[in-house]
Amino acid sequence: MFQSFTETASPEQGPPRLSALRDVMTAEGFDGFIVPRADAHQGEYVADRDSRLAWLTGFTGSAGYCIALANTAAVFVDGRYRVQVRAQVADVFTPVDWPEVSLGAWLSENAGDGAVIGFDPWLHTVAQLRELEAAAKNVTLRRSDNLVDRVWDDQPEPPATSAFVQPVDLAGEAHTAKIDRLATSLGPAQAAVLTLPDSICWLLNIRGDDVPRTPFVHGFAVLHADGHVTLFVNPEKLTNLGDHLGSKVEVQPVDGFLPALTDLEGPVQIDPASCPVIVADTLRDADIQIVEAQDPCALPKACKSTAELDGARAAHLRDGAAMARFLCWLDQQPAGSLTEIDVVKRLESERSATNALRDISFDTISGAGPNGAIVHYRVTENTNRPVDEGLLLVDSGGQYVDGTTDVTRTMAIGAVGAEEKRAFTLVLKGMIAISRLRWPKGLAGRDMDALARVALWEQGLDYGHGTGHGVGSYLSVHEGPQRLARTGTVPFMPGMILSNEPGFYKEGAFGIRIENLIIVEEAPALPGQTVDQMYRFETLTHVPIDTRLVDRDLLTEAERAWLNSYHAEVLARIGPLVEGEVSIWLTNACAAI
């Protein structure tokens, strides 16, 4: 079982730990200290050693900050976590809606003129510090070692797992060819510093187990314009790679990373959105010219190769069959006979039965009734609810060697009221709007996000998260730079994989989300088309949508046609992969409305 249901944090842990942190702050001359949910690689999933925000506050979400001052402390969370944070932190911490209220604005109002605020330069990016300095001009931001580490007596050791090769037939391109291709893209820079583990793993066609749910190898790298790479990683992690890396990759110990930067010939390229402050500081202190540009791996990694897309399709068929078996089983269980944990265990067992599952791609969200309104809910033994009549939201995914999956379905358990059906149908209309979209080349997620919300907006409703995120190829289930959101500025390009997941959440009552993964592809020209190039989405996910929750009167003819066509495709693709009662169930679940 990959997923654990043990409660790893509690509100009670926060007050004494906050007090200990304040003692160290005072001793070091700080008026405050910033604790992000981050590691030196800016990954969404962090090793236990780097879970400082959860250790200090009890908040276990995948994004956020704490600012501790002498007399107050705030925990900053986005819309996904505003219900969750109130249940997880003690009242010594004040939840703050972020990014509506920025860290800098809060500091300016609460820290006082001349306050000295400490931060760990490994855990904040160049762009984050720049934004913070611009908004908090009345305070002094001072670099420091991590004060949380000083008071965390039983802090776990860093991960020490072994890397393994991602075969070229799945990657679609040899790592040597990737190095050559990207080296020529650096422009005036003589080298580019790579700090994101997904970039390094993608570039070198390697994977690892340094963090849960995401096959990362932790390390740093420098891509040189002459076509070689210096990889900084503990050598014992590479013992299983054999001669895979070859002569183009020089391996050095990870503790040699910062010293090696001082020997580089400039200009050196960094990505301010992901580069730790300490890297830029080291380069500047050595008088090395810095060029700021996007991580050179970002777009090539996002635009999947033909082999990666074929792998994604295969993974989603395998995953779709597992989901069909799970949903068939779920439909046979009487309301009240299961718990949220039972649901998670059964779904993971169905994926494991494929004999291809390497890990789940994130902890399964199994939210019954009001727990479904907690956007990134993680069930524990303490929060486990019975699955009674009403709605059950299940958001889950698998890590397969040929692809990463992520699917959300909201199901009717027993009788469901008209309010829930209406809300479900409004969410479905938004998901269909994105699925059917054709658009001219050059548009980004911010140009499309509203289309998923229009039906909800017309009823005065909305949801507090983006509509979609990028997805990796046996890498992170949340991958940039593309986003289907108001903040998504990167134009969509063929080969990008994204999620399409509008939702609606009624706090204390229920949650609804419907999610498919989609691929950007070129759209064939229409008769009389005057736009040079149009794009559209191919749907990767093949899992029935619960039509018992659909108010047919709220759907247009075009929307009904899309839903019926989608279900016909699900039946055609998944039907041959299941048998017996699951086959019968799937046929009924995919019936036209």
Image (spheres, helix red, strand yellow):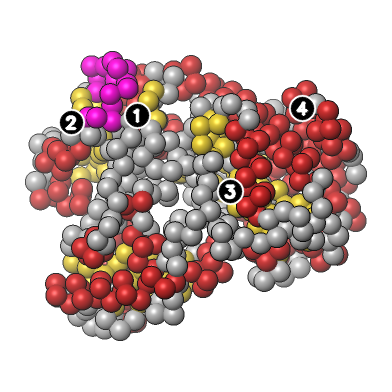
**Quadrant into which the C terminus falls:** top right
Q: Is residue 84 magenta?
A: no
- Residue 578 - label: 4
Q: Amino acid at mark 3?
A: Thr
User: Which of the image's four quarters has the N terminus?
Assistant: top right
Please tell me which residue is depicted at 53% across the width and 21% down the height of the picture: 307
Residue 252 is labelled as: 2
> Mark 2 and 1 residues: CB-CB less than 8 Å, in contact?
no
Left or right of 430? Residue 227 is: left
Task: Report the magenta stretch's main SS.
Answer: loop
Q: CA distance from mark 3 to mark 2?
A: 37 Å
Q: Which residues are magenta?
A: 235-249
Would you say residue 242 sits in the magenta stretch? yes
Distance from the alpha carbon under mark 1 to that under mark 3: 25 Å
Quadrant in the picture for residue 26: bottom left
Q: For mark 3, what is the residue?
A: 364
According to the picture, the residue beneath numbered tag 1 turns out to be 163
Which badge, 4 or 1, is on the more N-terminal residue? 1
User: Could one spot residue 294 in this view of the protein?
Assistant: yes
**Amino acid under label 4?**
Val
User: Label 2's element?
Assistant: strand
Tag 3 secondary structure: loop
| C-beta proximity under 8 Å, tags 4 and 1 | no
- Could you say which quadrant of the image residue 108 lies in? bottom left
Residue 6 relative to residue 564: left or right: left
